[in-house]
Image (cartoon, helix red, strand yellow):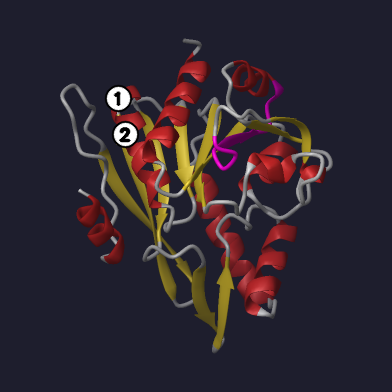
Amino acid sequence: MIWIKILIVLLGCSFPAVSQPGAIEPVETTGWCQVGDTKIAVKTYRYGSSGKRVIVNLHHNEITAIEAAHKVLSLSGGMLVHIENGNERLISFRQEGRLFRFDPNRIFTEAGIRKTLAKLSGRVTPAAIRSVRKFAAFMKSKLTSSASVVIAVHNNEDGDLSVDSYDKSGDLRREASQVYATSQHDADNFFLTTDASLFRKLKAAGYNVVLQHSKRATDDGSLSVYYGLKKKKYVNVEAETGQFEIQEEMIGALVEMIDGR
């Protein structure tokens, strides 16, 4: 099985999790958005008719997160939205003869669009801003307004980003209003939420969890900042690359909490 997963990644493909008895089969659709000279594909998988449970993945290289989301939704129902980008984290496009790059999780505010273009392209032009703004609007349109909570799924590398990053001595301590860390779980596997009630529930369940300080959080254009400013419920399920079972468990536990089970 390991060599099959590696082959899938190398070929730039992503597939829903293998079905099991009783699993819901997804209805797959593809939307396209033109950004400069690049057409970006966004896949939507609907498991059943419910639009209240929406999971989004913004970085196509985070394969573990995508597979875990498929597995949970095939049993619980809901919708998965993810960008297809050749298994690359960053999106590149050419416009007016120039090359631009941006992080698709840094485009949901005007400040974020300018920052990500400046950081990754070394330049910001009005035309590039308009193109990225259009893609951000396209992504927002894919996240149904009927969703009670938007769930994002991400992967990190060992020691790169963790719950400790938000603690008192961490680089991201300014972004958090509360942090709960436990030795029962790897620090790389944690939740970040804009909702105090979900923070308390995840803490009580014994998971690493961060409550974002949405008034003080740096406006980096991320989806968490965007939903924090809009005062809407958002949860990021962050897990180390390759830890499929724990990310599946985390997503499943979160879905049960949202459903009140």
Q: In terms of image quadrants, where is residue 105?
A: bottom right
Q: Could you tell whether 187 is left or right of 174 in the image?
A: left
Q: 242 and 121: which one is in front?
A: 242
Q: Is residue 195 magenta?
A: yes
Report the amino acid beneath label 2.
Lys
Report the amino acid beneath label 1.
Leu
Where disc 1 sits, the SS reads helix
What residue occupies the far left of the structure in this picture? 21
Q: Crowding near pointer 1: few (<14 within 10 Å), some, many (20+)?
A: some
The x, y position of residue 97, in whole percent, is 54, 89
The x, y position of residue 122, in whole percent, is 68, 80
Q: Confirm or deny contact between disc 1 and disc 2 (CB under 8 A).
A: yes
Image: magenta residue range: 186-196
Read off the residue under disc 1.
Answer: 75
Instruction: Tell me, yes or no, if residue 183 can be seen here.
Output: yes
Q: In terms of image quadrants, where is residue 32?
A: bottom left
Q: Crowding near pointer 2: few (<14 within 10 Å), some, many (20+)?
A: many
Read off the residue under disc 2.
Answer: 71
Residue at 18% from the left image edge and 29% from the top image edge: 20
User: What mark, if any, has residue 127 been given in the picture?
Assistant: none
